[in-house]
Amino acid sequence: MLRHLHIRDFAIAPKLDLEFSGGFTTITGETGAGKSILVDALGLLLGGRSDASWVRDGAQRAQLSAEFDLSRHAGAREWLIEEDLDDDHQCLLRRSIAATGRSRAWINGTPVTAQQLASLGERLVEIHGQNEHLALTREARQLQLLDTAGQTSSALNTLQACYEQWRELADALSELTASSALSPAELDLLSYQHRELEEEAIPADELEALELEHRKLSHAGELLESVGSAMEQLDGDEQGLADQLTRLQTQLSTYQELDEDIAASARLLEESAISAREASTSLRAALARVDVSPERLQSVRATLDRLGDLARKHQVPMEQLSEVRDRLAARLERSENFTEQRAELEGALDQALEKYRAQALNISAQRKQTAQRLADEVTALMAELGMQGGVFEIDVQHKPDAAPSPRGTDRVRLLVSANPGVAPGPLEKIASGGELSRISLAIKVASARGERRVQVFDEVDAGIGGDTANAVGALLRRLSVDGQALCVTHLAQVAARADQQVRVNKQVSTADVAVDTQNLDQEQRVEEIARMLSGKASEQSLQHARELLAGGAA
C-alpha cells in the first residue's frame, strides 16, 4: 500500500507531500492543473525512463520518494529479500534526476539500477494510462490478461522451464548438424590433410631441436675448424695457454709469501690454468658430436622444407602444425560419431517436446476455465456500464502442432458484442473507443481477484457520463475494497465514490507556474465536487454534490 509520496522540483511542482490511506483515492482539479504529474512521478519511482525535462526550471535536480507498507505484499517482500534490500514491512523508493539528465535511484537507502526499480515496481503498482484500453486489441496483451486473471504463474514457470529445455536441445542439434556433418568430398579432404600432418607434424620442442641440428650441420666445416683451433691454443704442446698459465703460476709461487698480491695472482693463474684445461675438454666433447654427414644434412633440410610447405598450406607457423593436426582429428571424430550423436539428441529432443506439449495442454485447460469465468463476469459488468445485452467472450484455441514458445501454443481472441442481438466479433473491430475503455475497466475489476498491487488509473473514465459514470465510480470503489486504488478523474460521480480526495491546484504568476495539492475534508469535497458538476459552486450544485457524496459512501 502506498503511504506517502514526496515530490520536489519535479516538472512544475516545487514541493508536494501527499499522505495516502487504503481504499479508493481520487485526484481532481481543473483541466491542465497538473493532476497527471503525480502519476508521472510515481511511474519514474517505479523505474520509468527519466530525462532532464522532468527537472523544474532553475533547479539543479528533481527528487522523488515513495513509501510503501508491504504487510500484504508478499511478492514484493520476497523480491527484496532475494536482492538483500529488505527492511521489514516498509519500503522506501527514492530517485534523483539531475539537470544534466543523470538519474540515481535507491531502495531502502541502497543504490540500485532503474531496472531493479522496475522489477520491484511491477510487484507494487499497476498503472493504467488513458490509452491502455488500446493494448487490449493486441493478442499478446490478451494472453497476458488471461494468465494474470487465472493466476497461472506457477504453471507458466513450469511451461517456460520445459520450453528452455527443448530450446537448448534444438540449438545443440542445430550446432551439431552445422559443425559435424561432412560431405564425402569434405571427409576425404580432411582425412588426407590429417594423414599428411600425422606423418609430418612434430611438437614445438622437437621442431626447435631439428632447427638447431640443421644449423649445426650447415656449419659443420666451419665449426670443426674453429673448435680445433681453439683446442690447439688452449692445450697445445708446451705452447698451449694452459701450460703457459701453469708456468707463470709456478714462477710467482716462489715469491707468494713475500707479498699478498703476488699470492693472490698465483692463485688466480692456477685457477685459470684449470679452467683452460676444462674448456679444452669440453670442446673435445663437442667436437666428437659434430656431424659432417651430407646425407643427414639433406634429410633434415628436406624435413624442414616439408614442414614449411604444410605451414603455408594451413596458414600457421610451423610450431602450430601439431595443433592443426589435433583439431582435424577432433573434427573427424565428431563427423564419425555424428550419426550416433544426432540420434541421441533427436531422441532427447522428442522427449522434451512431448513434455512441453503436455504442459502446454495443461495450461490451455486452465486458461479455458479462466476464460469462461472471466467472460461471464465481464459480461455482467458490461451491463452495469451501460451496455445491457452486450456479450463478452474469450476464445482460447489450442494449437498442438504450433512451434513451441515460452507462453504455450494457445491463440486467444477477445470477442464482444456491445448491443443485444449482435453476434460477438473481434474486440478491435467491434468496440468503439468509449466501449473499449469501459470493457477494459470491467476486465480489470473482474480479473483483480486477490490483487495486492496498488491500482492507479489516469483518466481512464474519459468520454463517459451519466449513469455510466456512476457505475464506473462504483466499480473503481469495488476494486479498492481490501486494497488500494488511485484515480485521476474529471467525473464528479467517480470522485464522490472515493474514500479520500486530493485536489491539485495550479498557481500562475507573471514569473512562475507552480502546482500544489490538498487533501480535502468533507466540506471541501462538497465544494470540489460542486465545481466538477457545474464549473462553480452554486447552491444547486452544492446540494447535488452532497447527494452524490451521500450516495457514494453507501
Image (cartoon, grey):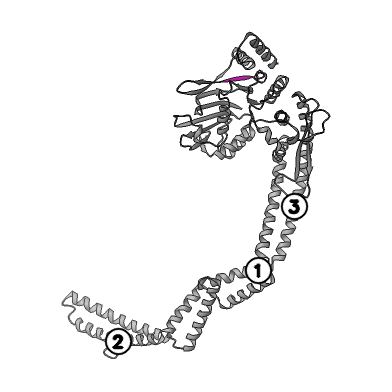
Q: Residue 522 placed where, x, y %? A: 61, 13
Query: Which of label 3 and label 2 is nearer to you?
Result: 3
Q: Nearer the viewer, residue 298 or 270?
A: 298
Query: Which of label 1 and label 2 is nearer to you?
Result: 1
- Identify the residue under disc 3: 353
Q: Residue at x 32, y 85 (%)?
A: 230
Q: Quadrant of residue 489?
A: top right
Q: Earlier in the sequence, mark 3 or mark 1?
A: 1
Packing grade of label 2 (10 A; few <14, some 14-19, many >=20) is some
Instruction: Find the magenta span and give its range.
Output: 494-504
Amino acid type at circle 1 is Glu
Rounded to the nearest angstrom, the CA distance separating label 3 from label 1 is 29 Å
Q: Which mark is drawn over residue 333?
A: 1
Amino acid type at circle 2 is Gln
Q: Residue at x 19, y 75 (%)?
A: 261
At mark 1, the secondary structure is helix
